[in-house]
Amino acid sequence: MTAAIHITSFIDASSRHLAMRCDLTKSKQTMHTDIIKKVLDYIKIAITYKISVTEWPKKILTVQGDLAKDEDCHRVVSETVAHFGQLDILVNSAGILLSGGIETISMEDYDRQMNVNTRSPFLMTKLSLPHLLKTKGNIVNISSVTGTRAFPNVVSYCMSKAALDQLTRTVALEVAERGVRVNAVNPGVIVTECHKRGGMSEEAYAKFLEHGKSTHAMGRVGQVEEVASAVVFLASDQSSFITGVTLPVDGGRSIMCPR
């Protein structure tokens, strides 16, 4: 069976790695993957892209746009469905991390972070749902340990991910009886470009990753592939009786007390 999948994302290396990992894993299940990528500024993109490497030339649909713009969200969904004829899975992974506590963050940064991390997955879910109801598909949101635990100096990021978790649970309740599942993964510290995009220097990021060994119960930080594997599981029939879950993929960070 073939599936059409939406993955909302950024054009940075870490997002490409997540998309590629999901894609290659799904290739074993002959699934199409829709990867939403970005081209203007470094805000979002939408790219569709598929699984068997030998079939890539036939399976790739590229839709460029900014998911913070309603018209681009509408266009991404409509062009994808027009191309593939259906939509089976939506993976909302677009996100940015802007540092700042309540006293320091600007309202401009607050609005930008909430628009990307919360509003865009809300709208992509709203627009995709009619198509997912037809295919009895599912949604996987990429949240964060910051959605369930509080951390200083990233107040709007924590808020945006907590809201995404609640979106996950609420929509799961609304559509469960109609055959659509909605779940989220909540990663801990994962080796990506996210923090450096938010302004952290190479040296500071290296120290941050080293410190992460003591803040995760497993004694290390995570890799993109480990998050992608959880996404693939939640998007597959192996999790057919799971909905409304916010799954920690955090090496035990969310269960630890401060030390």
Image: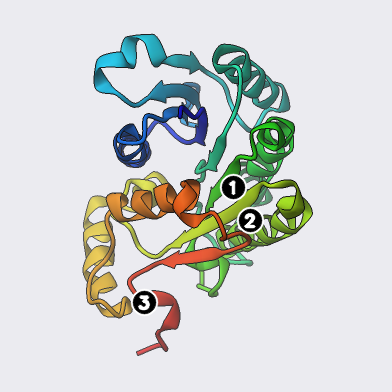
Q: Which residue is mark 3?
A: 252
Q: Could you tell whether 194 is left or right of 55 in the image?
A: right
Residue at 50%, 22% in the rendered image: 40
- Neighbour tally class for label 2: few under 14, some 14-19, many 20 plus, Cα within 10 Å: many
Occupied quadrant, residue 51: top left
Specify whether 90 is left or right of 231.
Answer: right
Q: Nearer the viewer, residue 122 or 49?
A: 49
Determine if residue 6 is in view: yes
Q: Earlier in the sequence, mark 2 or mark 1?
A: 1
Residue marked by disc 2: 164
- Up/down of 113 relative to 147, above or below: above
Residue 199 appearing in the image? no
Number of the front mark, 3 or 1: 3
Does residue 203 appear left or right of residue 116 in this picture?
A: left
Residue labelled with disc 1 = 117
Q: Secondary structure at mark 3?
A: loop
What separation in Å lies between label 3 and label 1 (alpha carbons)?
24 Å
Residue at screen point 48% across, 48% down: 237
Neighbourhood count class around disc 1 (C-alpha, 10 Å): few under 14, some 14–19, many 20 upward: many
Q: Amino acid at mark 2?
A: Leu
Kind of residue indicated by mark 3: Gly
Q: As shown in the figure, which amino acid type bears the numbered disc 1?
A: Asn
Q: Where in the figure is residue 147, as x and y percent of width and height?
A: 56, 65
Q: Are marks 2 and 1 in contact (CB under 8 Å)?
A: yes
Q: Which of the 4 quarters of the picture holds residue 16?
A: top left
Say what secondary structure mark 2 lies in.
helix
What numbered label is drawn on residue 177? Answer: none
Alpha-carbon span between mark 2 and mark 1: 8 Å
Seen from the viewer's position, the closer of residues 235 and 252 is: 235
Q: Position of residue 183 (x, y in %)?
A: 57, 55
The residues bearing labels 2 and 3 have C-alpha atoms spaced at a distance of: 21 Å
